[in-house]
Image (tube, rainbow, N blue to C red):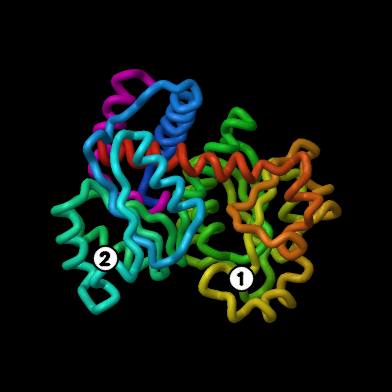
Amino acid sequence: MSDIAIQDMAASLKGRDFLGLVDYTPEEIRYLLDLAIDLKKKQKSGQPFQPLKGKTLGMIFEKSSTRTRVSFEVGMYQLGGHALFLSKNDLQLGRGETIWDTAQTMSRYLDGIMIRTYAHRTVIDLARGATVPVINGLTDRSHPCQALADYQTVLERKGKLQGLKIAYIGDGNNMVHSLMMGAAKLGMHMAVASPEGYDPDPEVVKNSRENAALTGGSLLLTRDTREAIENADVVYTDVWASMGFESEQAAREIAFKNYQVNEEMTSYAKKDYLFMHCLPAHRGEEVSEGVIDGPNSIIFDQAENRLHAQKAVMAALMS
């Protein structure tokens, strides 16, 4: 990409929301990935980069988190700004104030808003009411910040994304939705193996396939874990019962008993496959200890890259 194209891309992203990868072009996603890698190099070499000096990010947490809070808070500090933690008990939302009124008010104080919540509708309504960029830190439908960090990690390890195969084994949840859309936008081949009743959302599947058709990627849904994982460059899984679904744990343990990512299953992937998990992980459930703690695992590279990917998003949208 030429310097002029980079400048045009940077200008086009300023003031945007980051609600899902579906809203971004392949070129915009790749720009954010390249920016994340560049910001990581700057941070590792001790080179200051503070385009958000004097700016403030409000962080709304209706769902608790380790990686999301720490990475956004540290990221804003490294970019020269300040992050303000706001739990649901700190806001009038818990007492019935509308999302619109909250968004309008916070926009008068802040330069950006990150929200980690349950219903995706909440993020959409917040973005509609806000006059500053809104970043989706996670909803029950999508987790775009994690997916961006994940693809940054794969790009660093493999040197490319287009044409690679990523196999996802497990629940058709918010994580797989963002991974599917990211893979489709980036020209990757994705295979998802889930038990009956736990498939990804049909609308997300449809949108992902439409985008994959434009980039040379593909999307396969199957019940067969071997079919999904055969010759995979990347193997990914997530917990069987995500936050908010803990009451279904017992039923899900039965449904997912044949979907554990273990040494036998990964033997069908490429020898140099990368194992990924968005964390927190339950060793002995969705993944064996031998896989998650083995030589192919890059879970902590993923976790670290949440910092750099989110810095890229904040710098692009808020600077």
Q: Nearer the viewer, residue 286 or 163?
A: 286
Residue 80 in picture, x, y percent from top left: 30, 34
Mark 1 or 2, which is nearer the eye?
1
User: How far is disc 1 from disc 2 in space, using C-alphas?
Assistant: 27 Å
Label 1 is placed on what type of residue? Ala
- The residue where tag 2 is placed is 125
> As displayed, is residue 132 above or below residue 100?
above
> As displayed, is residue 208 above or below residue 163?
below
Picture residue at 44% right of the left edge, 24% below the top: 42
Rendered-image quadrant of the N terminus: top left
Picture residue at 25% right of the left edge, 78% below the top: 95
Question: Is 20 one of the magenta-colored residues?
Answer: yes
- The residue where tag 1 is placed is 241
Tell me the crowding category of disc 2: few under 14, some 14 to 19, or many 20 or more residues within 10 angstroms, Cα based: some
Q: Report the span colored magenta.
A: 1-21
Picture residue at 58% right of the left edge, 76% below the top: 246
Does residue 160 appear in the picture of this structure? yes
